[in-house]
Image (cartoon, rainbow, N blue to C red):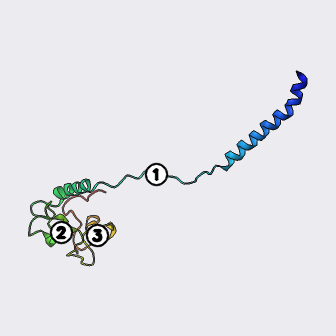
Amino acid sequence: MQFRLRRLLPTLMLSVGVLLLAGLAFAGDTKTSSKTYEFVRPPAAPDELENAVLDIFDTKCAFAGCHTGANAPQGLDLTEEAFKANLVKVKSAGAPQFLRVKPGDAANSYLIKKVKGVGIKGDRMPRGSSPLSS
């Protein structure tokens, strides 16, 4: 029995060594990525976004004496029935080089400039109220 074990030992050692080397080679062959991923919240659905905007306009802008009806400042009626037609792709009366809302380009939308108070004519909006939060 001892004789067989001595005879098989080199073969066993060689087999184990080959398996270890193959395992190391395989493990070293796997590619690791240095990319990191972060969760990005999907954009709000159009209805959700529209409702959020309407809530802001209703409470901060579109009330008696401000942006409602035919006599709204700069013709900017922000009531539910009129806000899209008066904002999206419409030149600003106060700064005609800008659109009131330029789709896909908030930085160059005059509405955002008026809310931030940057690069505007006249007062920051909403007038007489605390600035809107982002």
Query: Which residue is the extreme one toward the top?
Result: 1
- Quarter of the image holding residue 105? bottom left
The answer to whether the residues at label 1 and label 2 have Cβ atoms under 8 Å apart is: no
Identify the amino acid type marked 3: Lys
Assess disc 1: are there few (<14), some (14-19) or many (≥20) residues with their C-alpha within 10 Å of its C-alpha: few
What residue is disc 1 on? Answer: 38
Q: Secondary structure at mark 2?
A: helix
Q: Is residue 22 above or below residue 84?
A: above
- Quarter of the image holding residue 46? bottom left
What residue is disc 2 on? Answer: 86
Q: Which mark is residue 68?
A: none
- For the residues marked 1 and 2, what is the alpha-carbon distance in whole angstroms? 37 Å
- First of labels 1, 2 by sequence position: 1
The answer to whether the residues at label 3 and label 2 have Cβ atoms under 8 Å apart is: no
What residue is disc 3 on? Answer: 102
Please report the residue visible at 41 percent of the width from the left and 53 percent of the height from the top.
40
